[in-house]
Image: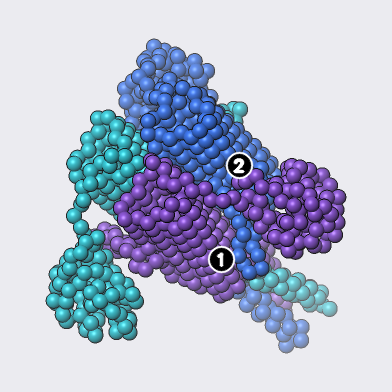
Chain colours: A cyan, B purple, C blue
Amino acid sequence: MNDSTYKLSELAFLVDGEIAGGPDVVIHGMGDISTAQPGEITFIVKVGQVDEIAATAAAAVIVPLAMEKAEKPLIRVKDPYLAAAIIHNHLLAAPFTASGIDDRAVVGNDCHIPTAVAIGPMAVIGNRVVIGERVTIQAGVVIGDDVTIGDDVILYPNVTLYNGCRLGNRVAIHSGTVVGSDGFGYATDEQGRHVKRPHVGIAQIDDDVEIGANVCIDRGTFGKTWIQQGAKIDNLVQIAHNVVIGAGSIVVAQVGIAGSATLGRGVVLGGQVGIKGHIHLGDRAMVAAQSGVHGNLQQGAIVSGSPAIPHREWLKASTLFGRLPKLNQELREIKKKLAELQKDQSDTSSGN
Amino acid sequence: MNDSTYKLSELAFLVDGEIAGGPDVVIHGMGDISTAQPGEITFIVKVGQVDEIAATAAAAVIVPLAMEKAEKPLIRVKDPYLAAAIIHNHLLAAPFTASGIDDRAVVGNDCHIPTAVAIGPMAVIGNRVVIGERVTIQAGVVIGDDVTIGDDVILYPNVTLYNGCRLGNRVAIHSGTVVGSDGFGYATDEQGRHVKRPHVGIAQIDDDVEIGANVCIDRGTFGKTWIQQGAKIDNLVQIAHNVVIGAGSIVVAQVGIAGSATLGRGVVLGGQVGIKGHIHLGDRAMVAAQSGVHGNLQQGAIVSGSPAIPHREWLKASTLFGRLPKLNQELREIKKKLAELQKDQSDTSSGN
Amino acid sequence: MNDSTYKLSELAFLVDGEIAGGPDVVIHGMGDISTAQPGEITFIVKVGQVDEIAATAAAAVIVPLAMEKAEKPLIRVKDPYLAAAIIHNHLLAAPFTASGIDDRAVVGNDCHIPTAVAIGPMAVIGNRVVIGERVTIQAGVVIGDDVTIGDDVILYPNVTLYNGCRLGNRVAIHSGTVVGSDGFGYATDEQGRHVKRPHVGIAQIDDDVEIGANVCIDRGTFGKTWIQQGAKIDNLVQIAHNVVIGAGSIVVAQVGIAGSATLGRGVVLGGQVGIKGHIHLGDRAMVAAQSGVHGNLQQGAIVSGSPAIPHREWLKASTLFGRLPKLNQELREIKKKLAELQKDQSDTSSGN
């Protein structure tokens, strides 16, 4: 956080927005429409939110292009939600504070750690770890041997990175997340004993990936588990050995992805989805919350249900699910009538 | 734990119970009916458990009012399960041991920490943290800046509280739980890049809330995520940004609640339930395990399934689900008979 | 990891395999068929993978017995997947390095810790803890009072063991996992307040159990929660109070098992399965991913769905689910035709 202020015109410039009223209004923060304070900017996403603009205490409002003017100074943009995110990040931007390595952190041998880092107390870093510029490693983080970490990474408290994992630039990992633990792989002998398969691969997290809290990303059996550039992973997600998450994919909380499944670019998985192992989800495939995907998906597929079927079909089918008792009752009545008809027919045919 | 002993009459008084036999029997602990030891009290919930009373080694038994006497001294109460919980807590009650702040804990600047605390080794506490009386912070807990914690709180090992979060009195949080990490919110630009929405809100946990292990409670985007008084959250639950959990609600393990959903008072969510974002569940609504709730629920609603429907309807429908192949077969047969009938009818009509 | 090398014949001997070609080929590691390097051994599981053998850079290949020879030296075995696991473990086997207790670890009073251990920095061990030979306790692990740990155990970083828990020999527990936290048990009074039930039991983990990352295993209310010999638990699994997991069972990621449920020997639960409390799953029962089991299962039962039904029935029923709209349409048409027939019949009968 910082204490910088900006003129409305400066903020509009950031998002290619048009000003309506007060270009010199001074902004120091952002709030949401109902609770924003004087000196803050806020945003709406629908033109219909006129009353909310009238009521807000905010100094200015980011609005859709379709809204030409209002009772407040405006920044008019194509996508207010996006513009608000960009402006909010700008308002909060602050230079990196290189507090160095805390005395109570532990650093192994043969590491490469630049001066511009912030490594907190009780962080434990293994041997031969390479860390980039402006990296923040908070309290209680444990990093195994031979890990490499890019620039501008932040690891929140109590994250664990197992040995050999690789993180790109601008990666953020929230508390309690475990990267690179062994995958769940056993071979079972004739006595039913499960013999562990060693996991000699790694987990690789590419640039601009953010990972939520208490996520598990297993290392590869061989090779790597791979989260590609710009993917975003929510809390409590399970990503098994050798999974590939394509660039820009979105994985909502509590999803489980089984071993060696691969996601293309821009795939979206709703919360609590399960993905079977060894299948491929094509680019931009979308899976509704709680669905279970058992087979490959074409690019752009939109599916729901467990097992997942095309979303439109699922919508119709799931509506009928609740009406199964009624359908069943109808079937009973039809059978009865049919029997009567058959009897009548038989009577008629036999001339009675 | 303590070594106090109580007379049966003292324990009966606690729960407004009636003694049948031995008011002076001395009790020092509680066990379950099959493994309780001499000197312990135990309980049954059904009158029919007479044989278990005969067999138990316990010194006394808490029983329903309907049981008038048995081979053991009894405490007769309306709700033995509740009475057992109250008595067991009483038997275990012990004064707080103020061990102070361990030498190997780290405390930031400008904190307010009373003498009567127990802060373990490797705990890390940020700046401007305010802690109440008789608070226990176990090993490896990390607390961010500007956190406030009420009285009689216990944080088990390796809990993480992000900056600015607020905990009321008598809050208990189990190991690995993360409170106040960023919510999962991005705005996507025209190139498909996900721009992070800053999360400047907090998470607030009110009095008497207990939270299980490895739970994730995100901070608000703006405003707060809010767990209200007396709610109980099981392990591995996901609570997204700006969710409100009403007072006294029960959230069983592995539930996921999406952003800005709100629960009324006394709502019960079964294990692995998913709740869509931005919906409201009325007071005392109940959702069966594994269900998915996509829309608002009235107070007192009882629902099941994904998408959730009234529980009674779901029971009937889900029974029929397994009989779909049979129903389908019947439909085939009906179609066949109908075709025959039509043919016959046509023959009859045409005078053949 | 080690730098040992082995002759192919030595490795074949380990797995009772037959050599075809080059018994003196020297092997120092294992890779998968597509990326293995010279000096490494690899494996295939299907005879049809002949082309992959031709293409691999590996020095030798473990193959099914049915494959008699190929372009590479072979080890022919009944189960190549199992043989590969055994050989890979052998190649990686290294003597335990007893680094002792790190200066920055904390050990309580009256513990029994042998010389041959490796306890990392920031590990915190309570009072009266008993630890076996060759135990590895990595950074940030927290162990409560009165815990007992067998020989050859490994606890990865940031694991938490609550007081009184017991671990057998050769147990491995991955990062972030919590063993022995309180179960989710409350008695509710007439005002709707949830009175916590004390949890005075423990969690017991028997020999050869491996537990993934961010798992939760609650302690017993009384008695114990019990993971029996050789069971394998994947990441993010919830195991409630007093659950018993039978020997050799396999529990895949994100499963939730409610209180007092018991699993027999060799039970397999797919990912995201939910098991109701107080039920029993017989030996070798198998539950498909995302299923919900509401009642007892016979030994060897194979079930799917929520609520779970026999897997074969579920397969048929779930196929028909997507066709519900079509079935419904057919039902409409039948009703219409039936009405017409009734009318015709009535006309015919009445002599029109």
| Horizontal side of residue B105 vs C300, given as left or right | left
Q: Which image quadrant is residue A203 in?
A: top left
SS class, disc 1:
loop
**Which chain is mark 1 on?**
B
**Which chain is mark 2 on?**
C
Kind of residue indicated by mark 2: Ile
The answer to whether residue C149 is above or below residue A319 is above
Q: Residues within 10 Å of mark 1 (few under 14, many from 20)?
A: many
Q: Nearer the viewer, residue A171 or A25?
A: A25
Where residue C57 appears, as percent x and y from the top left, is 32, 25
Q: Nearer the viewer, residue C331 or A260?
A: A260
The answer to whether residue B343 is above or below residue C132 is below
Residue B248 image label: 1
Residue drawn at the location 38% of the way across and 44% of the way down: B105
The residue most toward the top is C24
The answer to whether residue A329 is above or below residue A232 is below
Residue drawn at the location 52% of the way across and 27% of the way down: C112
To the question of a shared chain for discs 1 and 2, the answer is no
Q: Residues within 10 Å of mark 2 (few under 14, many from 20)?
A: many
Where residue C281 appears, as percent x and y from the top left, is 66, 45
Residue C108 appears anywhere in the view:
yes
Q: CA distance from mark 1 to mark 2?
A: 27 Å
The residue labelled by disc 2 is C202
Q: Which image quadrant is residue A261 in?
A: top left
Q: Nearer the viewer, residue A80 or A339?
A: A80
| Horizontal side of residue A99 vs A277, given as left or right | left
Q: Quadrant of the C terminus of chain A?
A: bottom right
Residue A270 appears anywhere in the view:
no
Where residue C106 appears, as percent x and y from the top left, is 43, 35
Residue drawn at the location 64% of the way across and 63% of the way down: C188
